[in-house]
Amino acid sequence: MTPLDYDYLQKVLKDRSGLMLSADKKYLLESRLLPLARKIGLPGISELVQKMRSGSESVTHDVVEAMTTNETFFFRDKTPFDHFKDSVIPELIKARAGRRSLRIWCAASSTGQEPYSLAMILKEKAAELAGWRIEIIATDLSPEVLEKSKAGLYTQFEVQRGLPIQFLVKYFKQSGTLWQLNADVRSMVQYRPFNLLQDFAPLGKFDVIFCRNVLIYFDQATKTDIFNRLMRANEPDGYLFLGAAETVVGLTDSYKVCPKRRGVYLPNVAAPSVAPGIAAGGFRPVSFAGR
């Protein structure tokens, strides 16, 4: 791979996905793109770049897919899910008692473990949420990982990573060598392809936004822009969850730290970047009535 190849790949990935590769990430490109090149019968990354330069949209798509599919697992980092279960949902049940509805967005949801973790927590609270309308919207750049998510099929290795054994027994059924999440939990999550560089307005407003372990790959200007737009998609008394290595500090005043809750942030309604409200999107809610 020549320096010109690297520069070209940097630009394509930045333009298509927001992914920012610094000069020391050559090893990451090689580890992900060499297997792709060999899979489609090319000797190396330079030949892959030649295909992209010649206008091969399928190869460009595969390259972006390979570089933006990130590792995930059930209840990753645990603490944010404890905050969601023990503090955030009880607070929202009180705050939304009049309208009896909740909207949750999992941005960059990858293969579905995060939104399904939230869905299982909400299933555990079905008695408290009886009669409520619940929407969990999960988005990702990759149509391929979204299809895997919809199927809810996971390997033994995947269900062993972070998933409590009682949830495996209660919410999954074995299907050959795989484990499939029960249909009633899968139906709680709605998936759609979405790029965080797009306009958030069509998605509507959310009480809770999970945008974890994706912004670390963006440059500062892109992070600031996304935070400001996330804030406008968040209800004024809503919540934003970030990954353990992510923060809003020094990047935006649209959010403020939530005291005593690591990884949780609150919209800063006094911030000058606040824009008028956005109408709720046209998604199918899940009702807990009769569950």
Image (cartoon, grey):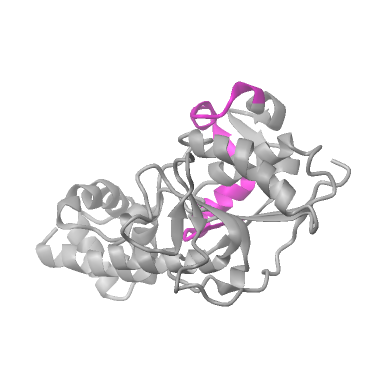
Q: Is residue 42 left or right of residue 251?
A: left
Residue 249 x/y as whole percent: 34, 55
Residue 16 x/y as whole percent: 37, 69
Q: Is residue 3 left or right of residue 197?
A: left
Q: Which residues are magenta?
A: 137-166
Q: Is residue 93 above or below residue 20?
A: above
Quick one: which residue is furthest to the right in this view? 290
Residue 171 x/y as whole percent: 69, 32
Quarter placement of the C terminus? top right
Disc tally is: 0
Q: Residue at x 39, y 69 (%)?
A: 225
* Nearer-the-camera pick, 49 or 225: 225
Please tell me in which quadrant of the rendered image residue 243 appears.
top left
Q: Residue at x 32, y 55 (%)?
A: 217
Q: Is residue 11 left or right of residue 189?
A: left
Quick one: which residue is furthest to the left in this view? 3
Q: Residue at x 78, y 52 (%)?
A: 97
Q: Is residue 255 above or below residue 272?
A: above
Tell me, yes or no, whether the highlighted magenta stretch contains residue 148: yes
* Nearer-the-camera pick, 158 or 104: 104
Quarter placement of the N terminus? bottom left
Q: Is residue 56 left or right of residue 282?
A: left
Residue 176 x/y as whole percent: 62, 28
- Would residue 187 be seen by someone viewing this image from the given angle? no
Tell me, yes or no, whether the highlighted magenta stretch contains residue 48: no
- Would residue 207 be seen by someone viewing this image from the given angle? yes
